[in-house]
Image (spheres, coloured by chain):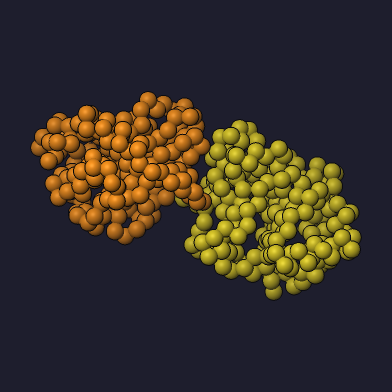
Amino acid sequence: MINETYKDKEILKPIKEILGEQGSIQLQEFLTIEGCESLKNKEFKRKYKPEEYSFKSISLKNKKLKEEIKRLLKDLELKELKLISSNFFQFGHKDYTLLNDKKNEKEGITLFIELTKNWKEESRGYTSFIENNTEVLRIIPKENSVTIIKTNEKMKSFIKYINNQTEENKREFIELKYKSL
Amino acid sequence: MLNDYINENYLKETKIKELHLEFNKNKNFPNLVLKDFFNNKVISRIEKEIRTEKFTKQESDLFSFSQTEDLLNTDNKILKKFYKFLNSKEFKEYVLKITKIKAFGKIDASAFIYAKNEYLLPHDDRLEKRKIAYVINLSKEFTNEDGGSLDFFEGKRIIKSILPSFNTLTIFKVIENKTFHQVSEVLTNKERISIAGWFNK
């Protein structure tokens, strides 16, 4: 499912360095065309708690993708990680998540595999990582990219409310969270 | 002093008793929407002066809007006088008669502008000192298509939706983890303008 480029250890070397130095990296053309196609047409379920979140999601069952991601993380020498959640999300107009005092990130790695097409930045819907009340990372949806983030317990994240400039377009992404052992 | 600002129909004792009953109708979310609350001439002048104040863009996970500083700090003489009225003992006692909630601390009052695509997501105003929230609406001619409504929640359901209308005062009791409310996204190029804040303990 993952583009062959990201299975080449020589190519992964600088990626590993940047991730080590900057704490995050975004890779383009992450999945093969067939890989992207196989992830379409999910039957999402509505999740709505007004004071916390509004979105649709479904648990990610795709074993092949999980295996390939596991391999990628191993090749990036990000060892001793345990997968703690893997979900497929869909955010449309009026969807959001809010920061929650009780929900900090874990020490580990989070991956966002973005499947959204033709996202208009002005419709917002980006993912924001906050540490000590400051935004440390903003992920703007970009089709077939993966963002790998080193997370820690001081971090929180939210997804900015999507306004009506999105019209019918929806942000769709897979989120995989790994905890350091 | 009350006569200088408030529509005289709202000052009659019988009306105040009626408003008290109305306020407590919904025990989970005590609220009141008072149309044509202020003297029209006075509030029209307030609206004009508010637009000359400096609004600063505010952005977070919860909101997107522009806001002035607390009107306590304004240099505008007319707004200063209006703030003094909102913060006066007479006005707080009037609000007490309606709500039976003691809130004699310093009032908070800022002006807000919600432009196209701006909003305030559901929250409960949870700060111990806040007793009653209020919104003085200064927007004109808003319809459902424009958005910008003040919505009250009971669980996941919107139980009341108040479209912005000029010279309307909305008040509601602040109850932690209960009185969740939002300002829905403004969907057109109209500006939703208001003065809002809290009566504090």
Decide if residue B128 is on the left or right side of residue A88: left
- Colour assigned to chain A in the rendering is yellow
Quarter where residue B106 is shown: bottom left
Quarter where residue B31 is shown: top left
- Residue at 56 percent of width and 34 percent of height: A164
In this rendering, does residue B183 appear at all?
Answer: yes
Say which of B37 and B14 sits in front.
B37
Decide if residue A64 is on the left or right side of residue A157: right
In this view, the residue farthest toward the left is B13
In this rendering, does residue B154 appear at all?
Answer: no
| Position in image of residue B165 (x %, y %) | 33, 30
Quarter where residue A42 is shown: top right
| Position in image of residue B140 (x %, y %) | 35, 28
Quick one: which chain is orange?
Answer: B
- Residue at 85 percent of width and 57 percent of height: A6
Residue B94 vertical placement versus B191 (above, below):
below
Residue B43 vertical placement versus B107 (above, below):
above
Q: How many marks?
A: 0
- Residue at 22 percent of width and 29 percent of height: B41
Quarter of the image with the C terminus of chain A is bottom right
Say which of B42 and B165 sits in front.
B42
Decide if residue A112 is on the left or right side of residue A38: left
| Position in image of residue A78 (x %, y %) | 76, 69
| Position in image of residue B153 (x %, y %) | 40, 43
- Residue at 80 percent of width and 62 percent of height: A15
